[in-house]
Amino acid sequence: MAKKRRWPWVAGAVVLVALGATAALAVVRDPLLLPGDHELTVYAVNDGISTEVTKAPGLVGRVIGMCDADTYYAEQGDRKLCLVLNGPLGDVRATRKDGKVTVSAAEVARLRSMAAQDTGTPAPTTTLVLMSGKPAALIPVADLVDGQPASVPAL
């Protein structure tokens, strides 16, 4: 009889470990879920081959944030985007609060410098992507003003 009573405890322990591992994976994959400043990697969007799609990728594609092997999936409002990225161009620190990702004024100058880098495409960079395991924010280069923080909707 004693062995039968142990199984609910073992099952409960397994469930707790699985929930903890899932929570840890979510935080590692997207550090912007936690409060405070976080370091994000900056990429340039390759406008020539990135596309807006009418249908989101399957469940697996949405979970891992990919349209296919080299195209990242992001939703910006009602828009579903498959983004081809060039880079990485560097790292910046940003915070997420109230559905917005904010980059400090000091980091905006670095973002403008990164956007001016040669990414190998014939057209200049028009949009930067902040990545935290998956696309976290799209920043239009034209909206970057030196000396002012940049705040954009989180993806």
Image (cartoon, grey):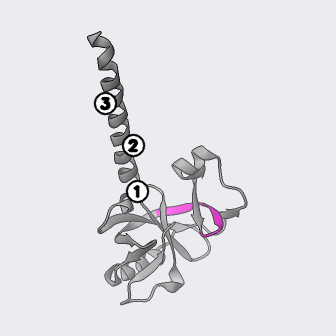
Q: Which mark is residue 113?
A: none
Please, is residue 75 above or below residue 140 in the view? Answer: above
Q: Provide the secondary structure element on which disc 1 rests.
A: loop
Name the residue located 39 percent from the left edge and 76 percent from the top edge.
102
Residue 120 position in % (x across, y down): 55, 67
At label 1, counting other C-alpha atoms closer than 10 Å, the crowd grade (few under 14, some 14-19, many 20 or more) is some
Q: Nearer the viewer, residue 105 or 10?
A: 10
- Does the image show residue 69? no
* Label 2 sits on residue: 22
Point out the residue furthest to the top here: 1
Q: Amino acid at mark 2?
A: Thr
Name the residue located 61 percent from the left edge and 75 percent from the top edge.
123
Residue 15 position in % (x across, y down): 37, 33
Which callout, 1 or 2, points at the residue further toward the start of the chain?
2
Q: Choose top left, top right, bottom left or bottom right for residue 104.
A: bottom left
Q: What span is colored magenta in the figure?
A: 77-87
Name the residue located 62 percent from the left edge and 72 percent from the top edge.
122
Please, is residue 36 above or below residue 71 in the view? Answer: below
Q: CA distance from mark 2 to mark 3?
A: 14 Å
Name the residue located 73 percent from the left edge and 60 percent from the top edge.
54
Q: Amino acid at mark 1?
A: Asp
Q: Nearer the viewer, mark 1 or mark 3?
A: 3
At label 2, counting other C-alpha atoms closer than 10 Å, the crowd grade (few under 14, some 14-19, many 20 or more) is few
Q: Which mark is residue 13?
A: 3
Q: Choose top left, top right, bottom left or bottom right for residue 18.
A: top left
* Label 1 sits on residue: 30
94 to the left or right of 135: left
141 to the left or right of 106: right
